[in-house]
Image (cartoon, rainbow, N blue to C red):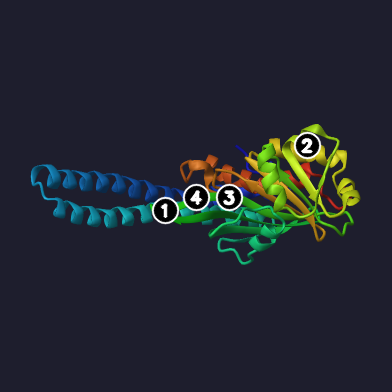
Amino acid sequence: MNFEGLSEKLNGFNRYYENDLKPTLAALEAKRKKAFSNLVIAGTVVAAIIVALLVLAENEDLAIVAGLVGLCVLGYFFYKLSDAIHGAKLSVLPVVCNFLEFDYSSSPRVNLLGRFRHLSLLPSYDEEKREDEISGSLQEVQFWLQEVKLIDVDHDEDGESRTTVFRGLICYFDFHKNFSGTTIGRKDYTALGNLFTDVFTKGERVKLEDPDFERNFQVFSNDQVEARYLLSPRFMERMLRLIRVSNVNDIQFAFDSGKLYLTLESSKKFFEGGGNKLDSRAYVQNIINDVGLIFDVVKTLNLTQETKV
């Protein structure tokens, strides 16, 4: 497996992996295995104690106390497990971004959720979790992205319920065409769902000639002529192609203030290595592939300054 297929800037990453990264990841994998083993053992012991107290001693109070103590012990070992996994991610992702000359921050410095909400690209929510901010320039296209999870909290007579209403990436890219209005592409719902979402989306509905694009997106704009200028047949074709190559569940977009805003919704967690062993090449390659989504957007949508789309 070769790490250097994504970009010529990754030349030399193989050598860095073998000499520097692999030993670090091997130590973290050993730490992960130990923490997982301790977690399983602790869980088994706690379960056995609780069963013994309930069945043999018939003492519910002691069983509850044992359960609470057990939860603390399990929480400690789960923290050690998560710490190893997080350490591996922070050993790989910043280095990959550095090779590609991108800026990375594990604690996001910019909060643009309000901007995406204003453009009707995100649902309403009560709680937010943001991580892994990456920004920079690719082929003279400035970009910014961030992984977010949005949660709706509802309180009723049965207590509190929490629902994840969005998980995925929010990002923007320079769009090198002149425009002054706002054009929004939302995912297409059923007829009843469209009636509901239309009320909360700015601008008027734009009818387009591409039936495949119309099946995937409902478009709104405050400038019908400009919307058709931006959504050329070639761009609509490329946007549909992006849905296929990006391995995400849903894509929504907006043209505003010289930028193309995208939300990429997915059930997966990005930049986590896909559950592979921390010291495996597959773990590192999966993180590189997630970063490669930036390349997919720029290449598939043809956003380079020279081509003008």
Q: Mark 1 vs mark 3: which is more N-terminal?
A: 1
- Contact between labelled residues 1 and 2, with CB atoms less than 8 Å apart: no
Q: Outermost residue, bottom direction? A: 109
Q: CA distance from mark 2 to mark 4?
A: 30 Å
Q: Which residue is mark 1?
A: 82
As helix, strand or loop, the secondary structure at mark 1 comes to: helix
Q: CA distance from mark 4 to mark 1?
A: 23 Å
- Residue type, mark 2 in image: Phe
Q: Which residue is mark 2?
A: 213
Q: CA distance from mark 3 to mark 2?
A: 23 Å
Q: Position of residue 165 (x, y in %)?
A: 56, 50
- Residue type, mark 1 in image: Ser
As helix, strand or loop, the secondary structure at mark 3 comes to: strand
Instruction: Determine the residue positioned at 34% across, 50% down.
Output: 35
- Residue type, mark 3 in image: Phe
Q: Which numbered tag is attached to residue 163? A: 4
- Contact between labelled residues 4 and 2, with CB atoms less than 8 Å apart: no
Q: Is residue 308 left or right of residue 287?
A: right
> Taking 141 as reference, is 43 above or below it?
above
Q: Position of residue 8 (x, y in %)?
A: 73, 47
Q: CA distance from mark 4 to mark 3?
A: 9 Å
Q: Is residue 158 left or right of residue 241?
A: left
Q: CA distance from mark 2 to mark 1?
A: 41 Å
**Within 10 angstroms of label 1, few (less than 14), some, or many (20 or more) residues?**
some
Q: Which numbered tag is attached to residue 166? A: 3
**Within 10 angstroms of label 2, few (less than 14), some, or many (20 or more) residues?**
some
Instruction: Determine the residue positioned at 36% across, 46% down.
Output: 33
